[in-house]
Amino acid sequence: MRAHLGDQLVVDSPATGAARRDGEIVGLRHEDGTPPYDVRWSDTDEVTLVFPGPDAHIRHLEHEQPVSAREGQTEKVFATARPTRATNPGDIGRRVAVERRRCGLSREVTADRARMSPDYLAYLEESPADPSLSTLIRLADVLGTTVAALRGGGMDLPPGQGIALLHPQLRDLEPEECRTLLSTHGVGRVSVSASDGRPAVVPVNYEFVDDAIVFRTAPGSVAAEAAETEVAFEVDHVDDALSQGWSVLAVGPASVVTEPEAVRRLTRHAHTTPWAGGEREIWVSVRPTSLTGRRITPADR
């Protein structure tokens, strides 16, 4: 018997052959996948060390294949090859990893608080897995988010639809804290005056380098019109689960980065390519002359 993290251990009833108990394998004791296993039972949500007996079999994540029938009873043999790992991790695992890093938690600490094996958490983050509801509930609680958010249920909804805090506290952020929040990089919004004279706000992937906000764009784009003008740049984070968040507003002159070595350095160290795709090789730099921010938290924090 060999298993992998995330597989299901099924214990059959000796009398009927039907499943009597099942659970998710959340820990391996041997690299080759042989018993014993740490199993989280679906009926109790408890994790126990299990040495499977002759009435137990492994149900693998990807598929099971019936290979023979004996005296009218179908015998199923489950493939033991590990499912081919996808190029990119599953959507749930990616969201778990992003939220974990946002909270500043290691895998070990997160797994301990969520009562699971660090190996299983690594598997969940790196593979197209389908964790149980109880697993998602524990992870959401540890990460300060919701099961729906981890599943991507609100992907097409704007943030901030949660209920307001009973006793919110709105406080101004010091410039140094604004810089710290900006340095996390990500997606922000730049406000410009378009060529037709009307104001426009466009989202851009940005970096924060040497106290300047920099982003890539394409010639003729709305974002490119920010160059050689004074612009406003805003970035924020909203936590719907806890009804709190922050925003930072930077105002200052924008200019095109023209020095070749500076362009190469920005391109080489960028955390991501522009989500919008296409050829976006113009780097625009915004050096703030005004940096303000606000944060909403519960009044007792």
Image: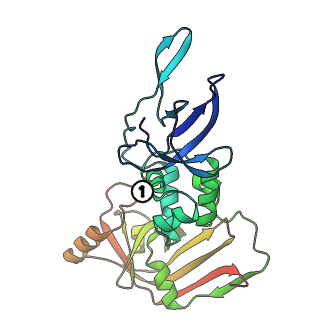
Residue at x 51%, y 33% (from the top left corner): 59
Q: Where is the C terminus found, in terms of image quarters?
A: bottom right
Residue 77 in picture, x, y percent from top left: 46, 24
On the rendered structure, is 158 left or right of 29? right
Residue appearing at x 43%, y 72% in the figure: 185
Front-lying residue, 8 or 130: 8
Instruction: Tell me the SS state at disc 1.
Output: loop
List the single residue furthest toward the left: 261
Above or below, 172 against 277 in this view is: below
Q: Is residue 29 left or right of residue 248?
A: left
Which residue is found at the position 37% from the left and 55% from the top? Answer: 277
Tell me what residue is drawn at x 61 percent, y 23 percent. Answer: 17
Judge by depth and name the residue closer to the eye, 162 or 63. 63
Q: Residue furthest top?
A: 71
Residue 283 in the image: above or below residue 43: below
How far across and how far down the image is residue 171, in percent?
A: 65, 87
Which residue in the structure is indicated by mark 1? 276
Residue 16 in view (yes/no): yes
130 relative position to 164: left or right: left
Q: Position of residue 15 (x, y in %)?
A: 66, 23
Q: Amino acid at mark 1?
A: Ala
> Could you tell me residue 275's position as x and y percent?
42, 58
Q: Is residue 156 visible?
A: no
Q: Nearer the viewer, residue 297 or 129?
A: 129
Quadrant where the N terminus lies?
top left
